[in-house]
Image (cartoon, helix red, strand yellow):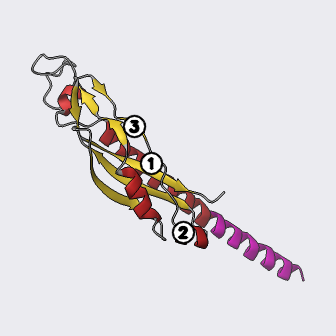
Amino acid sequence: MLILKITAFAVTLFFGIAISEIVSYRLFSLDEEIIAERKTELRDAYTSSDSRELFPGGSGSSGRGGTSSGTSPKITIPLKIVAKQKASYTEQARENGTEGTVTLRVTFLASGNIGSITVVNSLPDGLTEKAIEAAQLLQFEPQKADGIPQTTSRPVSYTFSLY
């Protein structure tokens, strides 16, 4: 009887540890995915065609913290979204109770127009298409380096919820 109890305890302990390891690995993997996405966003946000000017001391610099040409670093004003229209629900999505978030990678052109739009995360029932339509209507002030408008890409998300 004692051996049976010890065996049951050992099996329970083993499965508890195994499940704990699986859950920890999955949560850690999700954290790594989020971290990788944030690194990409930050790299995109702070990269320009001439990174030596934005980051003194980088490749091509004199090694004294300035740029090799002796010019001062560029002053960058980030992209500013002025108006973001809410994406509308489709009747099919409403009937099916579809909810979630559509993430798009939007190219904001230096001219003040929207460029390419790439789907990063989609939803069914026409919601991805509605998010793209809304993204095409974004109003923004382009990123500027030393007062010169720059083309940049950023993720833009649209959340659909049936409260």
Q: x and y percent of residue 9 in the render?
A: 80, 73
Magenta-colored stretch includes residue 4:
yes
**Residue designated by label 1:** 35
Q: Amino acid at mark 1?
A: Ile
**Residue designated by label 3:** 81
Labelled disc at residue 88: none
Q: Which sits earlier in the primary sequence, circle 2 or circle 3? A: 3
Alpha carbons under labels 1 and 3: distance apart: 24 Å
Alpha carbons under labels 2 and 3: distance apart: 29 Å
Q: Quadrant of the C terminus?
A: bottom right
Dominant secondary-structure state across the stretch colored magenta: helix
Q: Amino acid at mark 2?
A: Glu
* Image height of 33 relative to 41, above or below: below
Q: Is residue 96 left or right of residue 130?
A: right
Alpha carbons under labels 2 and 1: distance apart: 36 Å
Q: Which sits earlier in the primary sequence, circle 2 or circle 1? A: 1
Q: Amino acid at mark 3?
A: Ile
* Image height of 72 relative to 43, above or below: above
Query: In this rendering, which labeled residue sits more in front, label 1 or label 3?
Result: 3
Q: Quadrant of residue 113?
A: top left
**What crowding class fits label 3: few (fewer than 14 Cα within 10 Å), some (14-19), or many (20 or more)?**
few
